Image: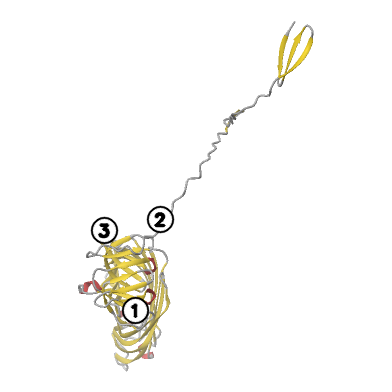
Amino acid sequence: MGGIFLLAPRVFCADPDGVQFIAVPPVVSTHTVLVTNMVVVTNYVITTNVVFSTNDPAPGPVKSPLPDLSWVPPDDRFDWIQLKSGEWLKGRIKAMQDRKLEFDSEELKLMTFDWKDIRQMRTSRYVGVLFEGQETIWGPVAITPELITVGGLEPRTFPRKELQSIAPGGSKERNFWSGKVSVGLTLNSGNSKAMDFNAQGNLQRRTPETRLNLDYIGDVNAADGVENANNHRANAEFDYWLSRRLYAIVPQAEYYKDHFQNIGHRLTVGAGVGYYLIDRPRMEWNISTGPAYQQTWFDSSQPDEPTTHGNAALSFGSKFDWEITRRVDLILEYRGQFTRRIVGETLHHSVSTLDIDLTKRFDLNVSFVWDRIQSPQQDSSGVTPYPDDYRLVFGLGVRF
């Protein structure tokens, strides 16, 4: 009985004469199939789908190169700025001072940029440019990362690092001004009637060489028809820049009244110098000092004391401004005066403000105000006011 049994790679053939081995050529595979789908069934299913790709991984975002500096914006009626990202914006330059550029875009409205974030700038109109140790130069301006060219009949070129400030020229007076007003109001009615009103304001005029600051802060509080607080303080200061950090104060003035401190009116006029200890894009700190003359009118005094005093004083101040984030600023302001004991001896005024941007125009302000008169003057009834006054003020502010 014959048969064939295949046991690769040999074949066994059985026949009547015996068993013979017949060699069979090996099988060569020219295609390989890799099965990667496997299902193991127990109490759960494990899926082991594996995908092999010979392509390179998908590339991530590629930062586009900055445009070449040779590209110039069109010669139109707009000012142009280029950010360090390479983007161009057109609009109107309001001012550049304290390392901040204010730019008014027709679509994006008023914006403030750190000067370090500006790569290039072109102006179509005359502006005033102040460099360290130089007078103000007027003309259209072209600014690159390294140089500043002021046009006109005889164009001049300066290193960008020497730039101190920029102000628009040949424009309306209102373009030199900016300001902010913050108001808080609380009204209570029912079993008791109360009213608390507070306000803060700042108005500033800037040119390349000068800066005029006008500040006001006031608080009025009454409950059930009885007044509990009524004080007002206004400051004016005119600064003339001597260098990037040093400026002369010519003059400065302060008006103050607080009936609860027995002060009907107090006027202080003086001069001085100021200096920026820190001058960074997001942090500034300046200090100032100088002589002054002070005139005080008390509401009342003891029978043997005059109600008016005039005397010399030494004024000193400090302002710290820290831009914590794009929307949150911390501002610490202090003003002090050292004078005669009869009018208070040492006078202190401090305002700590947390300024939170809500929109491009509106802010939320939280301020802690401290006023101190070291030696308050007794009134005609012999009552001596407390030396310290504290206030926590919440207000909604608008910039213009």
Q: Quadrant of the C terminus?
A: bottom left
From the top left corner, tell me how far across and down residue 391 is, in percent. 37, 72
Q: Amino acid at mark 1?
A: Phe
Q: Which residue is mark 3?
A: 107
Could you say which quadrant of the image residue 246 lies in? Answer: bottom left
User: Would you place residue 93 above or below residue 211 in this image?
Assistant: above
From the top left corner, tell me how far across and down residue 106 is, in percent. 25, 61
Q: Observer-nearest residue: 313 or 257?
A: 313
User: Would you place residue 20 above or below residue 45 in this image?
Assistant: above
Q: Residues within 10 Å of mark 3 (few under 14, many from 20)?
A: few
Q: In terms of secondary structure, where does tag 3 sit? A: loop
Could you say which quadrant of the image residue 338 lies in? Answer: bottom left
Label 3 near label 1: C-beta < 8 Å? Answer: no
Could you say which quadrant of the image residue 101 lies in? Answer: bottom left
Q: Amino acid at mark 3?
A: Glu
Which circle's residue, 2 or 3, is located before the other in the chain? 2
Q: Observer-nearest residue: 126 or 302?
A: 126
From the top left corner, tell me how far across and down residue 325 is, in percent. 41, 64
Q: Which residue is mark 1?
A: 131
Q: Which residue is mark 2?
A: 64
Q: In terms of secondary structure, where does tag 2 sit? A: loop
Label 1 to label 3: alpha-carbon separation: 31 Å
